[in-house]
Amino acid sequence: MIIRQLTKQDFQDVIELGCCVHGEGYINQQELHDIYSKGIKNGINPHFVAYKDKVLVGFRLTYAAGQWPLDRWCSEEKWSIKPNDVCYFKCNTVAEEARGEGLGGKLLDASIQAVKKQGAKAGISHLWKQSPNNSAVKYFSKAGGVLIKEHPNRWNREFNPDYNCALCRGECQCTACEMILIF
């Protein structure tokens, strides 16, 4: 297994794996380019990919602190850190065949090291509560993440018209667990 920083040459693999795991319309070229740009700060790249036998099996996308938009799903009044000091862990995706091996945690650790070098003091994420075996919330909790608030229907079509949830197969009813991880 090779874990390294994401480059633009990895974009198509990331799009394919993201849509396979999370559902059709999960991410496209323009969105990925925007996420990539918002992650780079002080020349430091916090995005990581994992390849096994030249096949992408996981990726982590992360916005740099102060370079991502707070939205209605952010409960910053409940954070103990100023929003400009908080990065955003956008997406951690692991292919089914690579789950259960600690890859999600390794990708998160790599991003944490990068955002700390950028100056972040904490990271926030909206984790998919309905992920297989609730693995998203479990791995983030294991890393020290604390639940701030649950947001039902976070990814439904009212807010994400092009997204087709892999679990719900249509109108998404999944819950996002807003969690913070202080470094």
Image (tube, rainbow, N blue to C red):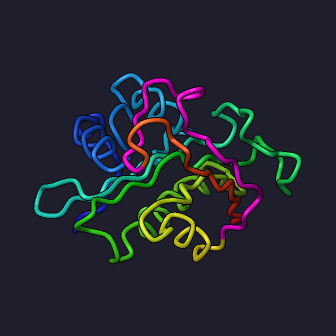
Q: Is residue 90 magenta?
A: no
**Residue 129 placement: quadrant:** bottom right
Say which quadrant the C terminus sits in. bottom right
Position above or below: 175 against 35 = below
Q: Which residues are magenta?
A: 145-167
Q: Please state if 93 lies on the left or on the right of 182 as rendered.
A: left
**57 and 46: which is toward the camera:** 57
Q: Residue at image x 69%, y 48%? A: 151
Q: Residue at image x 34%, y 45%? A: 6
Q: Residue at image x 17%, y 63%? A: 52
Q: Is residue 148 magenta?
A: yes
Q: Residue at image x 22%, y 53%? A: 56
* Image position, residue 130 (x, y; %): 51, 59
Q: Please state if 1 lies on the left or on the right of 106 as rendered.
A: left
**Residue 2 placement: quadrant:** bottom left
* Image position, residue 76 (x, y; %): 82, 45
**Residue 72 placement: quadrant:** top right
